[in-house]
Image (cartoon, helix red, strand yellow):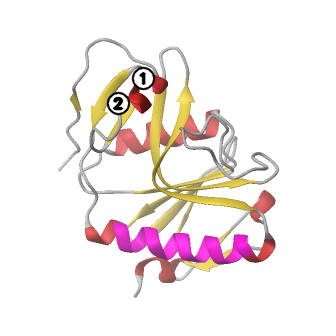
Amino acid sequence: MPQTSTIIEQQLISGEELWEMGDIGPCELIEGRIVMTSPTNAEHGFIEVNIVHALKSYIKRKKLGWVLTGEVGIYTRRNPDTVRGADVAFISKERLPDRPHKKYLEISPELVVEIFSPTESRKNIRDKVREYLAIGAEQVWVVDPGSQTVTVHRPARETQTLGIKDILRGEGVLEGFRMKVRDIFET
């Protein structure tokens, strides 16, 4: 079933105003309007943990930067503001030398991971990928639990879809990171 979005504010607001509202439930800010989203399912959480564990282990050993999770807010547009909630993100110490602050990210992560949910539309995922690449993400991984694939998006390059027998590889500052696609979906 496609994700149904409910706009709860008609007056445009900024990302800062959304932040000041506190916890209003799962949502994103799209062109100044709050769009409520559904909580994720258990499979989504399981997959997210597998990806975070692999990335965090690699990044900690190499002292490369920060792994963020839990629908971390990232500005992808200003005036009107869009704040997207990424499932997983990696931002290097080159881009952000100090630990991330307590507000939404205004600097693009090098990597953003989106886990496709049955309640989310393919169009929404495509929009997020386009926005993340436009602000400077070097890679966006779209994980599809249904087909057990990972589609890798990069700026100005063709997408690459990896199956269960393939290896997911980091690029740029994440050069050397490797993870079996199978390990994303298995216990």
How would you rate the neighbour count of disc 2 (Cα within 10 Å): few for under 14, some for 14-19, many for 20 or more? few
- Measured Cα–Cα span from mark 2 to mark 1: 7 Å
Q: Secondary structure at mark 1?
A: helix
Amino acid at dot 1:
Glu
Q: Which mark is residue 140?
A: none
Report the magenta stretch's main SS.
helix
The percent coordinates of residue 38 (x first, y second) are: 24, 48
Query: Does the magenta run of residues contain 100?
Result: no
| 182 vs 53, nearest the viewer | 53
Please name the residue shown 32% across and 41% down the image. Answer: 23
Query: Callout 1: 10 Å neighbours few (<14), some, many (20+)?
Result: few
Counting from the top left corner in percent of width and height, residue 128 is at 47, 40
| The C terminus lies in quadrant | bottom left
Q: What's under tag 2, amino acid-wise?
A: Met
Q: Residue at x 37, y 74 (%)?
A: 46
- Residue 47, magenta (yes or no): yes
Residue picked out by circle 2: 21
Q: Is residue 167 visible in the rendered structure shown here?
A: no
* Rendered image quadrant of residue 27: top left
- Mark 1 and mark 2 in contact (Cβ < 8 Å)? yes
In this picture, residue 23 sits left or right of residue 184: left
Disc 1 marks which residue? 17
Residue 62 in sight in this render: yes
**Residue 149 percent coordinates (x, y):** 45, 68
Q: Which residues are magenta?
A: 45-60
